[in-house]
Image: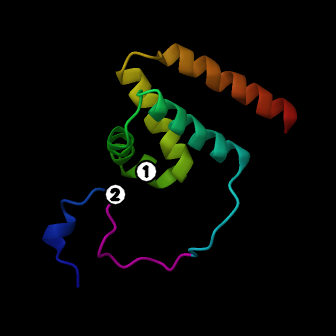
Amino acid sequence: MVDKSLTDYRGVHDLGGLLCEPFAADEHDYAPWEKRVHAVRELLATKGLLRVDELRRAVEGLGAEKYQRLTYYEQWIWAMSQIMLERGLLTDAEIGARVEEVRKRVGADG
């Protein structure tokens, strides 16, 4: 049995020691957009613009609702965006404009 006093201090991401549903640990193919997100993270890290600990902090800071709603790579996108905003490398307007471009492209193709 899990001590409730310990779970009071857990973040939504911290599942160690808790009972969870079984999951498939099989390898799977990544969607092209997931591969691109991973590549962007690698590029930012190579350029010294993103550290793994920063990404983890931002993902863990999403809040329970957003953390549970977003997929793994969606969490990365959100976290990388927040870090770029914090560093002053991007503005909300620049991110919003790019998101709108992607929405139009996906809407036109799909």
Furthest-front residue in view? 46
- How far from the left and from the top, in percent, is residue 55? 39, 41
Furthest-right residue in view? 109
- How far from the left and from the top, in percent, is residue 33? 68, 42
- How far from the left and from the top, in percent, is residue 45? 45, 34
* Of residues 42 and 29, the one drawn nearer to the viewer in this rendering: 42
Which SS type dominates the magenta stretch?
loop
Label pair 2/1, CB-CB below 8 angstroms: yes
Instruction: Determine which quarter of the picture holds residue 53.
Output: top left
Q: Which callout, 2 or 1, points at the residue further toward the start of the chain?
A: 2
The number of numbered discs placed on residues in the rendered structure image is 2
Residue at screen point 52% across, 52% down:
72
Q: Quadrant of the N terminus?
A: bottom left
- How far from the left and from the top, in percent, is residue 61? 33, 43
**Inter-mark Cα distance, 2 to 1:** 7 Å
Along the horizontal axis of the image, is 33 left or right of 56?
A: right
Label 1 element class = helix
- Which segment did they paint magenta? 12-23
Along the horizontal axis of the image, is 85 left or right of 26?
A: left
Q: Which residue is mark 1?
A: 67
Residue 12 is tagged as 2
Residue type, mark 1 in image: Tyr
Instruction: Determine which quarter of the picture holds residue 32.
Output: top right
Along the horizontal axis of the image, is 3 left or right of 107?
A: left
Furthest-bottom residue in view? 1
Crowding at dot 2, Cα within 10 Å, few <14 / some 14-19 / many 20+, comes out as: some
Residue at screen point 70% across, 60% down:
29
* Of residues 90 and 29, the one drawn nearer to the viewer in this rendering: 29
In magenta segment, residue 18:
yes
Residue at screen point 80% across, 32% down:
107
